[in-house]
Image (tube, helix red, strand yellow):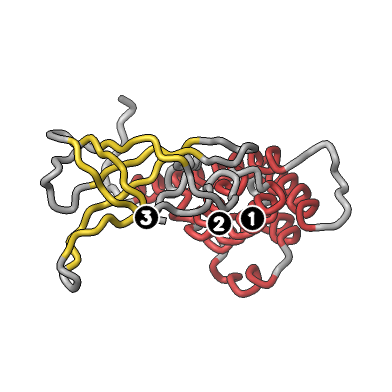
Amino acid sequence: MLQEVNIKYRDRQNTETIYLPNSCPHCGNIMTPYVYFGVSSYSAFDNDRIFGVLVQCINDECNKFYSLQFINTFNEDEGYSENILIKDYYRPPIKIDLPENIEKVSPTFVDIYTQATQAKSEQLEQIAGVGYRKALEFLIKDYAISKNSEDEDKIKKMLLGKTIENYLNDFPKLQRLAKAATWIGNDETHYVRRHTNKDVHDMDAFIKSAAQFIAADYDADLADQFINGNNFMPTTN
């Protein structure tokens, strides 16, 4: 519905006509929110000025506040200005704590891991577990392929457990981290959980530790290339 609201701009107060969305972003119920006031750091005369409006859900079981953001733009076809709702999502940015350079080994792992972490942050742990399991498979297989490029096709078709068993022998601790994360990941995708004392949070921790090992090995390879590419005697200083 259309409603007039008083907006306090930087230099004056103005009455703006806005279209109120008829659903609450918190509870999802259909209703017309109660409007309190609007504010803006813009001048009332600025083109494409933006202002915010504080509203409240009128559903007794919710009653939560939220804000609506609008931009005033000139409609050239109709010859008048209108206030367009800017769609906002109450979703804070998620900090992804992964080691530097891991995207050089497996960019797909980083992408899937980020999505799984987003799901976990929204308490969608059933979905997050499946996502972490897929992310782990890309991390381990991409790493194995980077070390054994001649076996690329073979590794792509191999079961994750076999890949861990056959291609991570040089790093026993990494092998154990990957195996433990895989066991939990398999529980996340199967009907019956075999390891009831571990969950998606443990799986996440094991995956991040495995990524640390792999990133360190990647950096060590870069150091080898640097040292072997210089034809001077190393110093001890």
In the figure, is residue 102 to the left or right of 129?
Answer: left
Residue identified by numbered label 2: 112
Quarter assignment of residue 38: top left
Residue at mark 3? 2
The nearer-to-camera label among 1 and 3 is 3
> Mark 1 belongs to which amino acid?
Gly
Q: CA distance from mark 3 to mark 2?
A: 42 Å
Distance between the Cα atoms at labels 1 and 3? 43 Å
Which dot marks residue 131?
A: 1
| Depth order, front residue of 164/235 | 164
Q: Secondary structure at mark 1?
A: helix
Tell me the CA gap for discs 2 and 1: 6 Å
Residue 173 visible in the current orientation: yes
Q: Earlier in the sequence, mark 1 or mark 3?
A: 3
In what element is the residue under mark 3?
strand
Q: Alpha-carbon neighbours of circle 3 within 10 Å: few (<14), some, or many (≥20)? A: few
Contact (Cβ within 8 Å) of mark 2 with mark 1: yes
